Every structure is written in C-alpha cells, then in structure tokens.
Image: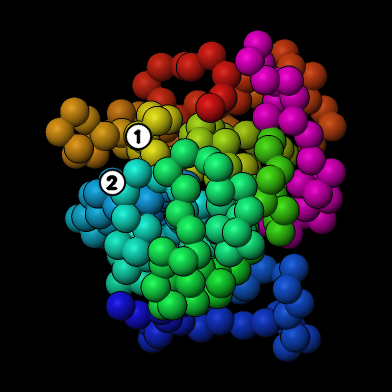
Amino acid sequence: MTHTMPGLDDKRRTTTRGAAGARTANEPRVVKTNGRPAIRLGIIGDVHAEHEHLQEALRLFDHHGVDELLCTGDLADGPGCIERCIELLAEHNVLTVRGNHERWLLDDKVRHVAHAHHRAELSSDALAFLSALPKQIELSTCAGPLLLCHGVGDRDMVKVWPGSDRLEPQRSELLDQLIDAGHFRWLINGHMHYRTLLHFGGLTLMNAGTLSRRHRPGVTLIDFGSSQLTAFEFDGGGQLQPVLVRSTEAQDDDPRWDNTAAFCGDQSPVVLYPSTEPGTS
C-alpha cells in the first residue's frame, strides 16, 4: 500500500506554498491542475471507514468524468476498513483534508466513540498517510478560488448552521473573516453530515454530508461550467442514484446572509436532498 499524499505523485498537479514560498501549518495547501481552473468536481463528505460506499462513489465520478475529487476527511471511526479507504483515496488522487476523527486517532483520544479505530491497529503506511493530511486545501476553479476543509479553515470542530428547531444558530467568526476578505468564492466542508448550500454574498458554503450509513449517505457532483449541481444517494442495493439537480447559483427564493453573525434562526439553508429534513445530523 502506498502512503503518498493523494495527488502529489499525479503529474497533472503542482502544489505551492503561497506567494512568499513558505506555508505555515495553518495556511491552506494550494493545488493547481494543468495550469487551468477545475470545472467538474466530485465531492465526497466524511468517510467514516465506509470503504464500500467510497468505492461506489469513486466509480460514479469516474463514469461522469471529473477534473478533481475532493473529500472532507473523517476517514476514521466507522464500521468498515479504514486501510482500504486510504488505499482508494491514494489510488484515485483524491484531495483530502484531515478531520477531527483523524486528529483524535493520531493523538489516541476520544476512543470511546462507536467503531473507533486505534493507532496500534493501523499499518505504518496508514498512519503516515493520516499524519500527512493537510487541514485545508485551496483549489482554483472556473467559479473562483475554493477552500476545502473539515470545519472552517484549520478549525475542525466548527459548525455552521443558520438555526432550526433541532439546532440553534452556529456562527463562526473565522468564516465571517473569510467572507470579508473576499478571496474565496466557495468553501466546501464536512463535520455536520448534512448536505446543504449556504449563500453569503460573494461566498457559497457547501456541506458535503457523509458516506456514513447512519446519516443518509450520498455524494455531490458540481459542474461549474454549466452551473449545475447533482446530488446522489445510495439505494437499497448500495448504488448511487441521482436525487436532486439544481443550480450552483443562488436562486430568487434561496436565503442569503451577509455573514454568520446575521443568523437568527428564521431561515433554512438549501438542502441537497429530495425532501427537507428537520434540522441537522
């Protein structure tokens, strides 16, 4: 099994450390593809060792043809094989960030969670792979710069939610700073296991959801060229089926916020499911 970071051996990509040439641990890894912005993206949410779901997701995106595959992390702590998940991510050059479950596993903390993995059970290659995962990745797309992270930026426990009956508003000063800075047009994250779009003026946040069978698993295909987004869910036979198609752009009836400080619990985000669920996972 290889422990090479996904994408770093792929000749289509180059990785830079910012204009000054020196990247701190908290700055995003910048990935460029062929010198041109990515158009079609395959989005995979928190994996949680669901290797069979991951394999099906990769098959789907290979069929549709995408420029890049993105994953929001949390590979650890689930009912399947984390080593197989790592192999698949590396083989398919999936741009993957570290989630809080990788941090917990590597620090040998919070191991009381269901289906927890332990350092002693993992190969040295798997541990090296997890240790090398960046906290955030910046990717150039034809819709503008995109930030991939697990929570928000380098903070893997941050939730963003405008408020509902099940969960009060979850605001983020760090996200508000990113919105004000105006550099990123898209932010794709995980952690909440609920596929949504939130439009903030010049930035759109998409939660990628999860592959975990406990939380309505699925994936998303983004085509910035046609401004179209397609959500997929697993059917009873473990195959992904399209369940929703919509524009990547904010529509007239979609809620918008200036920033998360404007959350007051009276507007719901755009949900990427065929029917609305009452709240978040």
Q: Determine the residue positioned at 19% across, 39% down.
A: 239
Q: Amino acid at mark 2?
A: His
Quadrant for residue 259, please give it: top right
- Where is residue 221? Give x, y as percent: 37, 47
Residue 200 showing in the rendered view:
yes
What residue is at 28 percent from the left and 46 percent from the top?
53
Tags 1 and 2 in contact by the CB under 8 Å rule? yes
Q: According to the image, label 1 marks what residue? A: 213
Q: Which residue is mark 2?
A: 53
Name the colouring of the figure.
rainbow
Query: The residue tagged with tag 1: helix, strand or loop?
Result: loop
For the point 68% across and 38% down, the residue is 159
Count of labels shown? 2
* In magenta stretch: residue 276: no
Residue 136's quadrant in the figure?
Answer: bottom right
Left or right of 243 on screen, residue 20: right
Residue range (magenta): 161-186
Q: Position of residue 49 (x, y in %)?
A: 38, 51
The foreground one among 232 and 86 is 86
